[in-house]
Image (spheres, grey):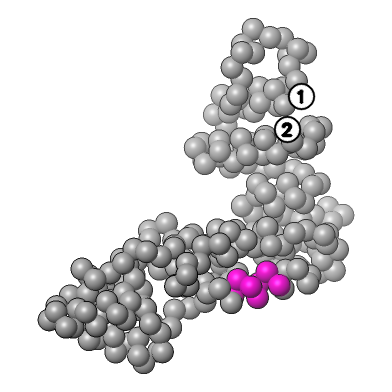
């Protein structure tokens, strides 16, 4: 946690950031099932606060501890929270993911609360994801795959196995070559020259991922199952909508 060189220091000799690191280390050493952090980083300067937020996220990914983090800083909540609970006068106003809070505010109080937030930084691939027009199966031959592409007016198609795990992308030209070669399987003709992202990939990262061929970006889950695709126009629409709100 970045405590090297401070092993022999007294608490009052540590900086604010180091004191918070020690406090977090002590909490983790108790191996508690749930950690309660009440305004843990509020007294730190902005740069150290960001560093501590990132360290907390890294520790969380390794330790898998349930953490209840109390903060009045919405940006902080959006940065580190998997789910956010908004309270007003001691009552729960809304519970949801950061994206749900930003895109589906429960009432005027929540709308006022999220004013000024850079939605483009928070929105994810899920917000721009579209259903696939068609997919090919690993058992399909090249003629079947090409027929599906022509039926849906597309020049490439994602190929999945029986569990919908993504295997690759088949282009129309590759399917035609497979037919000419008398191939029964499309698997040898698949390309991996495309981008795939999880649902929580920040939306602002996606635009730079489109290649010159502009293949739709595949959205997958942790099991590599294909959930949908993101096209360049959808990213532009979502970013434009975020800028208007």
In space, the residues marked 2 and 1 are separated at their CA atoms by 9 Å
Q: State the residue at coordinates (34%, 71%).
A: 169
Q: Is residue 228 visible?
A: no
Q: Which circle's residue, 2 or 1, is located before the other in the chain?
A: 1
In the picture provided, is 40 more to the left or to the right than 146? right
Q: Secondary structure at mark 2?
A: helix
Assign the N terminus to one quadrant of the image.
top right
In the displayed orientation, state which residue is furthest to the left. 182
Q: State the residue at coordinates (85%, 68%).
A: 108
Report which residue position mark 1 lands on.
16
Total marks in image? 2
The percent position of residue 241, horizontal first and vertical second, equals 72, 73
- The stretch in magenta equals 234-240
In the displayed orientation, state which residue is furthest to the bottom. 151
Q: Nearer the viewer, residue 208 or 223?
A: 208
Report which residue position mark 2 lands on.
48
Q: State the residue at coordinates (60%, 63%).
A: 203
Q: Is residue 1 above or below residue 77?
A: above
Q: Is residue 173 visible?
A: yes
Q: Are marks 2 and 1 in contact (CB under 8 Å)?
A: yes
In the picture provided, is 150 more to the left or to the right than 201? left
Q: State the residue at coordinates (75%, 68%).
A: 243
In the displayed orientation, state which residue is furthest to the top. 8
Q: Nearer the viewer, residue 87 or 155?
A: 155
Q: Is residue 128 above or below residue 87?
A: below
């Amino acid at each position: 946690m970045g405590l090297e060189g401070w092993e022999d220091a007294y608490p009052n000799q540590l900086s604010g950031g180091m004191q918070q690191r020690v406090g977090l280390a002590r909490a983790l050493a108790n191996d508690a099932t749930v950690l309660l952090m009440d305004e843990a980083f509020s007294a730190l300067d902005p740069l150290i606060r960001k560093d501590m937020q990132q360290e907390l996220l890294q520790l969380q990914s390794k330790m898998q501890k349930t953490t209840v983090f109390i903060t009045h800083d919405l940006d902080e909540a959006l940065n580190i929270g998997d789910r956010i609970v908004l309270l007003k006068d001691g009552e729960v106003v809304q519970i949801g993911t950061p994206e749900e809070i930003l895109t589906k505010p429960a009432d005027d109080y929540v709308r006022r609360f999220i004013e000024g937030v850079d939605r483009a930084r928070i929105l994810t691939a899920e917000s721009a994801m579209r259903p696939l027009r068609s997919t090919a199966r690993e058992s399909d031959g090249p003629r079947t795959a090409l027929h599906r592409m022509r039926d849906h007016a597309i020049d490439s198609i994602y190929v999945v196995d029986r569990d919908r795990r993504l295997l690759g992308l088949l282009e129309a030209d590759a399917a035609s070559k497979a037919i000419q070669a008398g191939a029964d399987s499309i698997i040898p003709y698949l390309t991996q020259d495309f981008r795939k992202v999880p649902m929580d990939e920040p939306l602002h990262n996606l635009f730079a991922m489109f290649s010159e061929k502009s293949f739709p970006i595949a959205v997958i889950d942790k099991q590599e199952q294909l959930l949908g695709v993101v096209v360049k126009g959808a990213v532009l629409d979502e970013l434009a909508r975020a800028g208007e709100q």
